């Protein structure tokens, strides 16, 4: 009895893990396809985008490895204010490679008196100096919503790699599907064996089993009756 209960609990745990892994795989797939379809390499889900923080330049507002959410659709990039935290493409001066950065606006400048176009000077909360390059309003990807999840950014970065996706998603999925297939085949085999066992019993044996069952039931009822009479 205890063994059956343990197997049932184990089966429930395995099913929950399988569902969790499937959800993770779906989320990663949605983010990947969304980033490809957006045209700027940024995943967008209902106007919001998740970004993995790559440094501690904004600590303690958010830290390296955090996952932050920025509004990337439906905001006015020409009407941002000092204090807003914006997400934008920056260039690594050492390598020349572009990367996504999120820093706070410390200065706002208009292109001229007749244009709505603006330039934003940004700075990391944990840095002593402003960023060298000003950000034009057309270069702003999104505005930080204040929502962050610690550590999840590092996890998502790892899962997006081929190694991470294989280790954390593909291999566990394969193992769990094999396990579910094993359970399914075990049930089919057990049903067939049960059916074969019943068909293999002669009519006399079936009659004897039925008589023994009825006899045991009658004895149980008589025993209950005697106990009630003694009370």
Image (cartoon, rainbow, N blue to C red):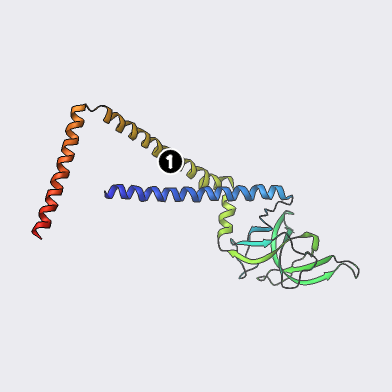
The answer to whether 205 is drawn above or below residue 80 in the figure is above
Residue 165 x/y as whole percent: 55, 46
- Quadrant of residue 93 within the rendered picture: bottom right
Q: Nearer the viewer, residue 55 or 18?
A: 18
Residue 56 x/y as whole percent: 62, 65
Residue 160 seen from this side: no
> With 153 as the anchor, is 220 left or right in this view?
left
Q: Nearer the viewer, residue 178 or 188?
A: 188
- Quadrant of residue 65 within the rendered picture: bottom right
Residue 12 seen from this side: yes
Residue at figure coordinates x 17%, y 40% from the top left: 214
Q: Mark 1 points at which residue?
A: 180
> With 99 as the anchor, is 113 left or right in this view?
right
Residue at figure coordinates x 72%, y 50% from the top left: 38
Residue 164 x/y as whole percent: 55, 48
> With 198 as the anchor, is 28 left or right in this view?
right
The answer to whether 39 is drawn above or below residue 127 in the figure is above
Residue 178 x/y as whole percent: 44, 38
Residue at figure coordinates x 71%, y 51% from the top left: 41
Q: Give the total number of marks visible in the rendering.
A: 1
Residue at figure coordinates x 34%, y 34% from the top left: 191
Q: Nearer the viewer, residue 215 or 6?
A: 215
The residue furthest left is: 230
Give SS at disc 1.
helix
């Amino acid at each position: 009895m205890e063994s059956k209960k343990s197997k049932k609990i184990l089966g429930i745990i395995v099913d929950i893990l399988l569902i969790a892994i499937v959800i993770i795989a779906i989320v990663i797939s949605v983010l990947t396809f969304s980033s490809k379809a957006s045209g700027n390499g940024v995943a967008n889900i209902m106007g919001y985008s998740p970004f993995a923080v790559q440094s501690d330049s904004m600590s303690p507002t958010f830290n390296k490895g955090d996952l932050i959410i920025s509004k990337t659709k439906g905001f006015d990039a020409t009407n941002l204010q000092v204090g807003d935290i914006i997400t934008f493409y920056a260039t690594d001066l050492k390598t020349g490679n572009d990367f996504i950065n999120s820093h706070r606006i410390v200065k706002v400048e208009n292109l001229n008196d007749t244009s709505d176009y603006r330039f934003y000077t940004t700075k990391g909360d944990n840095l002593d100096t402003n960023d060298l390059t000003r950000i034009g309003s057309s270069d702003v990807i999104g505005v930080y919503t204040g929502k962050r999840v610690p550590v999840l950014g590092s996890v998502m970065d790892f899962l997006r790699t081929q190694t991470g996706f294989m280790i954390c998603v593909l291999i566990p999925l394969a193992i769990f599907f094999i396990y579910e297939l094993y359970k399914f085949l075990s049930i089919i085999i057990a049903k067939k064996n049960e059916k074969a066992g019943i068909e293999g019993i002669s009519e006399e044996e079936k009659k004897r089993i039925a008589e023994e069952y009825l006899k045991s039931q009658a004895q149980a009822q008589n025993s209950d009756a005697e106990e009630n009479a003694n009370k």
